[in-house]
Amino acid sequence: MSADSPDPTEATAVVPALVRDYRRLLRLFPFAYRRAHGAEMLGHLLDAATPEQSRPARGDVVDLVRAAAREWALAPLGPTAERRRRGAVGVLVVLSVVLGYPAAASVGGAAEILGQGGGVVGVLQYAPLAAAWVLWAVGMLVLAAGTVRVAVPLLGAAAVAAGVLLGGMAYAGASGGGLYPVLSGLGWALGLTALAVAASVHAGFRGLATGADRSGRWARAAAGVGALLPVVAIVRAAADVPAWFPEYASPVTSLGGGPLVAGAAVAVVVMLASRGARQALPVLAGVAAAVVVGRTGLMGSRGLEPMDVVDLGNLWALLAIALVFTAASRWVVNRVDELADARASLRPA
């Protein structure tokens, strides 16, 4: 070995600024993820760095930002892969059935308007999200058939369509009055987005995790029930049959607020007691908060203020309320999981 060649056993010095910058990038990740994987990720990044490198590589920055955004998007489903799998199945099962009601109300209403010769203008006026719900119903049918990877882009397209339609309604409401339909529909749009994300997570775990096939059957059955509701609404509109109880457009009024609140409280307690089911609670809590607050007039959307002076900031406030409920519920579920893990560690093998 010549005197000028480097010794392969000599440790390569790491520039302190590089360590500092990588640690700053790792702070973009959720705390639970950093606690579990932060040291390992930092070690891999420093091992891959070239000698005397003083700044993170552009590719590393892009990959870390993209990975951090993905972790934050999936954080409501849980901090670990197994909990996310269970949370995704819970969200799929519950939201597939729950979203069937607004889908049936919108699609059934659109069918009635078209049957009466109302045309596209009438549908946009009285059932503005009908196109998004049709995409959702098709995605649910595909999901019920077991083709999850085909259903994911359809459900994603339904969520995007709902967002675009609500954006157009918000603009029209700001210029002509009437933001209540936007506020009341925002919760359902969040539900569509959550369902699309849950379906994507579920598709990634199919065949890779124990119990994925059994949970997949539950998800397919719930998707079939949800897709059936708008189909029944179309048939009912075509046959001019009176709505069955509870009505699609107002299940809360039909069933009564008290029984629904009591039933929801019991469902929350039961889900918290189940290790798998409680992983879906944060997402469901955020969607429920947006739906309830948006429809009850708490944002000045129903009778509390003139419709033409409702500020668009209420939309952001409603989103913030949904995020607060999601984050608070995730914190509670994480504490319950930690308590369950501590009790399990004390049991004899």
Image (cartoon, rainbow, N blue to C red):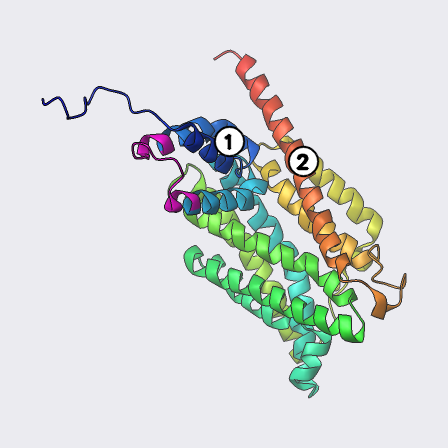
Residue 347, placed above or below residue 273 = above
Where does the image place residue 258, in percent across and percent down from the top left? 84, 48
Examine the structure image and report whether residue 4 is included in the region drawn in magenta: no
Name the residue carrying label 1: 34
Circle nearer the viewer, 1 or 2: 1
Q: Nearer the viewer, residue 332 or 253?
A: 332
For label 2, the SS is helix
| Residue type (three-letter) at the residue carrying disc 2 | Val
Q: How many marks?
A: 2
Q: Residue at x 54, y 68 (%)?
A: 135
Choose between 53 and 43: the one closer to the eye.
53
Residue 251 occupies quadrant: bottom right
Q: Is residue 162 left or right of residue 310?
A: left
Q: Residue at x 47, y 31 (%)?
A: 20
Q: Which residues are magenta?
A: 45-61
Task: Tell which circle, 1 or 2, labels the residue nearer the N-terminal end.
Answer: 1
Pick the front one: 31 or 250? 31
Residue corresponding to mark 2: 270
